[in-house]
Amino acid sequence: MSAIRVIEPGFQTTVQDLGRFGYAHLGVSASGAADAFALRAGNLLVGNTENAPALEMTLVGGVFEFEDPAVVALTGSDFGGSIPLWTAVGLQAGSTLRCGPCRSGARCYLAVQGGIHTPKVLGSASTHLLTGLGGRPLREGDRLDIGAQSIRRPRTHSAPPPEQTGPLRVTAGPQADWFRDELYEEAYEITEASNRMGLRLRGPAIPSPPGHMLTEGVSLGAVQVPPDGQPIILFVEHQTTGGYPKPANVISADFSRLGQLRPRDPVRFERVTMEQALDLLRRQEEWLYSLL
Amino acid sequence: MDIRPASDRSLLVSFGSEISLEAHRRVLHLLAGLERRPAGLLNLHPAFASVLIDFDPRRLSHVQVEALVRERMAAAPLQPQASPRAIDIPVRYGGDAGPDLAEVARHTGLAPERVIELHASAGYLVYFLGFAPGFPYLGGMPAELATPRLPAPRKHVPAGSVAIGGSQTGIYSVDSPGGWRIIGRTYLRLFNPESTPPALLSAGDRVHFIPQRDS
């Protein structure tokens, strides 16, 4: 089996797919790629199914050596990679692919034709850092097998996706009517305490509503307001249940932007209707399937 | 029953805003009703009186999922009279296994032996698993045992730790940070991804703690 050798692991590089679904009732959150859109695009570019395991690099990328010829793609943010982003590239046996510190955004994905072959845990290859489900961050000297499955020919010409800017779009959360409009009035900042479990924001404190809140299930992208009034956006490794009220939930079409936020990035929120949210998602999906 | 979108890909089904056996029974009813999941239904997050349903918005709509919930809730529960599972959890109380037993005794004004006796004589209901893989939300702890959480959480609490946090008791199911007072430890694994099912407990189970002697 062909393999990748990890020469430098980078700051925090993990194997990810689209997540571990069907176990939330046992307390297991889905995990999966922080920027699932970039992971799916990378897989489609190299000819994989969109859920194939790939490498997620965070803030500082790694250096990887390919023992045999391989077809790879880098997607997501620009980590100064030795190959161009958003296109499939053929590598010769013995090639080294280098990435470095991020130049924009927080995450870059390395997809490999055939997928990264690691044992699945509860149906997914995704690494859940907090619990260790599915593995651990890569270390120098790790050897990763490349799988044999790919379904199409790679795409070597593609344009990057349309850039997403402006406020994060949200729909109403389950306790939206407990809050006034504080969340939408000021800018917040991503703090250093943010990770795959949650993006912690800093900004004007949102007054705690008086309502009595029973612990309930929470969804990806939920904006929750703990007693200190500093909002937390629940991210891919979030706990399955929580007891803080939630005025809003980031829309699916903006999940990929959450995965690219860095500490000190400014964040604003904007309300959209459910119809607008689904329409934005539809347009994002259309771009993705133009890679097929 | 209140049904509302929680996001563009989830629906929150609530059965009131209080912890009650009736709400719990309806949570179990809906979980059982959705055990056979249509394509696109991704995850169920039960809690004390609600179930959050995650779905793939490319395959299902809020309207379709709501209709499914109403249909399955209208159907009779699958096993209305099934008796709950009773599970004994052996626990070594105090010592290295329960470093906070003395503090719980001090706070409650009870002798450590009495804390153990009260904790182990009660019957507990698993309302649901949540928070972390395999972690049970238990109801039924005697009110006398209530003890506030630690002022600052420990960075590392070993899996199997039996602890008290406020008026609740629980069992840490995986190694994790935690702020509850640790009074004992069980050798049982509450979560093992190689087991089927991976969690030892499930919503609706009855649990007893059985004190173990040091050996």
Image (cartoon, coloured by chain):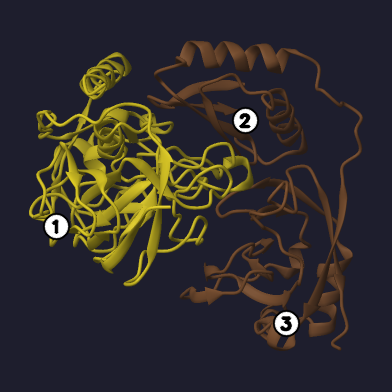
The percent coordinates of residue A111 (x first, y second) are: 29, 44
The percent coordinates of residue B76 (x first, y second) are: 81, 16
- Under tag 3, what secondary structure? helix
Q: Which mark is residue B105?
A: 3
Label 2 environment density (alpha carbons within 10 Å; few <14, some 14–19, many ≥20)? some
Q: Colour of chain B?
A: brown
Q: Amino acid at mark 1?
A: Arg
Tell me the residue at 79%/79% (across/down). Answer: B92
Query: Taking A7 as reference, is A166 left or right?
Result: left
Q: Which mark is residue A264?
A: 1
Tell me the residue at 34%/47% (across/down). Answer: A54
Q: Which chain is yellow?
A: A
Q: Could you say which quadrant of the image residue A215 lies in?
A: top right
**The numbered mark 3 sits on a residue in which chain?**
B
Q: Which mark is residue B16?
A: 2
The percent coordinates of residue B38 (x first, y second) are: 59, 19
Tell me the residue at 46%/75% (across/down). Answer: B152
The percent coordinates of residue A207 (x first, y second) are: 30, 47
Q: In this picture, is A63 found above or below B2?
A: below
The alpha-carbon separation of the residues under discs 3 and 2 comes to 35 Å
